[in-house]
Amino acid sequence: MTHNIAVENIKCGGCMNSIKTALLKIKGVENVSIDKDTETVTIDGTVEKTILIQALSKMGYPEKGNNDLLKKAKSYVSCAIGKMN
Protein backbone atom coordinates (compact mmCIF):
# COMPACT_ATOMS: atom_id res chain seq x y z
CA MET A 1 0.00 0.00 0.00
CA THR A 2 1.24 3.51 -0.79
CA HIS A 3 0.44 6.55 1.36
CA ASN A 4 1.00 10.12 0.19
CA ILE A 5 1.06 12.60 3.07
CA ALA A 6 1.35 16.36 2.55
CA VAL A 7 3.25 17.78 5.52
CA GLU A 8 4.56 21.10 6.86
CA ASN A 9 8.11 22.31 7.63
CA ILE A 10 10.30 20.41 5.13
CA LYS A 11 13.10 22.90 4.51
CA CYS A 12 16.15 20.99 3.33
CA GLY A 13 17.99 17.73 2.89
CA GLY A 14 18.52 17.46 6.65
CA CYS A 15 14.76 17.39 7.16
CA MET A 16 14.39 14.80 4.43
CA ASN A 17 17.13 12.62 5.92
CA SER A 18 15.55 12.72 9.39
CA ILE A 19 12.12 11.84 8.02
CA LYS A 20 13.36 8.97 5.89
CA THR A 21 15.57 7.52 8.65
CA ALA A 22 12.79 7.62 11.25
CA LEU A 23 10.07 6.22 9.03
CA LEU A 24 12.21 3.34 7.78
CA LYS A 25 12.56 2.21 11.42
CA ILE A 26 8.80 1.62 11.65
CA LYS A 27 7.90 -2.02 11.14
CA GLY A 28 6.16 -2.50 7.82
CA VAL A 29 7.65 0.54 6.06
CA GLU A 30 9.43 -0.62 2.92
CA ASN A 31 10.30 2.60 1.10
CA VAL A 32 10.13 6.36 1.72
CA SER A 33 10.44 9.10 -0.86
CA ILE A 34 10.11 12.83 -0.25
CA ASP A 35 9.36 15.72 -2.58
CA LYS A 36 10.72 18.84 -0.86
CA ASP A 37 9.04 21.25 -3.29
CA THR A 38 5.53 19.94 -2.64
CA GLU A 39 6.34 18.82 0.95
CA THR A 40 4.89 15.39 0.19
CA VAL A 41 6.10 12.19 1.84
CA THR A 42 5.33 8.96 -0.01
CA ILE A 43 5.54 5.76 2.03
CA ASP A 44 5.25 2.20 0.69
CA GLY A 45 4.49 -0.63 3.08
CA THR A 46 1.89 -2.25 5.26
CA VAL A 47 1.63 0.44 7.95
CA GLU A 48 -1.59 2.30 8.72
CA LYS A 49 -1.59 5.93 7.59
CA THR A 50 -2.51 7.18 11.09
CA ILE A 51 0.69 5.69 12.54
CA LEU A 52 2.75 7.45 9.88
CA ILE A 53 0.98 10.77 10.44
CA GLN A 54 1.61 10.52 14.20
CA ALA A 55 5.31 9.71 13.68
CA LEU A 56 5.75 12.64 11.29
CA SER A 57 3.96 15.01 13.65
CA LYS A 58 6.14 13.96 16.61
CA MET A 59 9.20 14.88 14.54
CA GLY A 60 7.77 18.31 13.72
CA TYR A 61 6.32 17.52 10.29
CA PRO A 62 2.52 17.54 10.78
CA GLU A 63 -0.02 17.12 8.02
CA LYS A 64 -0.74 20.31 6.06
CA GLY A 65 -2.98 22.63 8.05
CA ASN A 66 -1.96 21.25 11.47
CA ASN A 67 1.18 23.28 12.13
CA ASP A 68 1.96 25.19 15.32
CA LEU A 69 4.97 26.80 17.00
CA LEU A 70 5.98 23.64 18.89
CA LYS A 71 5.97 21.53 15.74
CA LYS A 72 8.01 24.18 13.92
CA ALA A 73 10.58 24.08 16.73
CA LYS A 74 10.69 20.27 16.64
CA SER A 75 11.26 20.36 12.88
CA TYR A 76 14.37 22.52 13.38
CA VAL A 77 15.77 19.96 15.82
CA SER A 78 14.97 17.07 13.44
CA CYS A 79 16.56 19.02 10.60
CA ALA A 80 19.77 19.57 12.57
CA ILE A 81 19.97 15.89 13.46
CA GLY A 82 19.41 14.96 9.82
CA LYS A 83 22.26 17.23 8.75
CA MET A 84 24.65 15.56 11.23
CA ASN A 85 23.82 12.01 10.12
Image (spheres, rainbow, N blue to C red):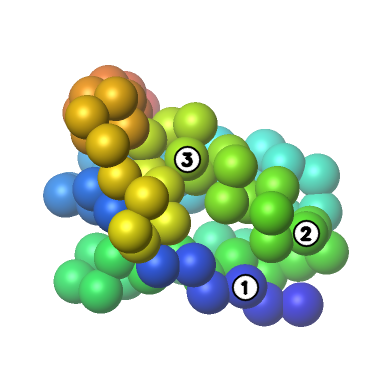
Q: Earlier along the polypeptide chain: callout 3 or callout 2?
A: 2
Which residue position holds label 3? Answer: 57
Q: Secondary structure at mark 3?
A: helix
**Label 1 vs 3, first from the N-terminus:** 1
Pick whichever of labels 1 and 2 is earlier in the sequence.
1
Label 1 and label 2: CA atoms lie apart by 9 Å
Query: Where residue 28 sits: x, y (%)?
Result: 81, 54
Residue bearing the label numbered 2: 48
Give the residue pinned by disc 1.
3
Residue toward you, 74 or 67: 67
Report whether residue 69 is seen: yes
Q: Quadrant of residue 25?
A: top right
In which quadrant of the rendered view does residue 69 lie? Answer: top left
For the residues labelled 1 and 3, the Cα–Cα distance comes to 15 Å
- As shown in the figure, which amino acid type bears the numbered disc 3? Ser
The answer to the question of whether label 3 and label 2 lie on touching residues, with beta carbons closer than 8 A, is no
The residue carrying pointer 2 sits among few (fewer than 14), some (14 to 19) or many (20 or more) residues within 10 Å by Cα, namely few
Compared across the picture, whether 46 is left or right of 64 comes to: right
Judge whether residue 13 can be spotted in this image: no
* Quadrant in which residue 59 is drawn: top left
- Quadrant holding the C terminus: top left
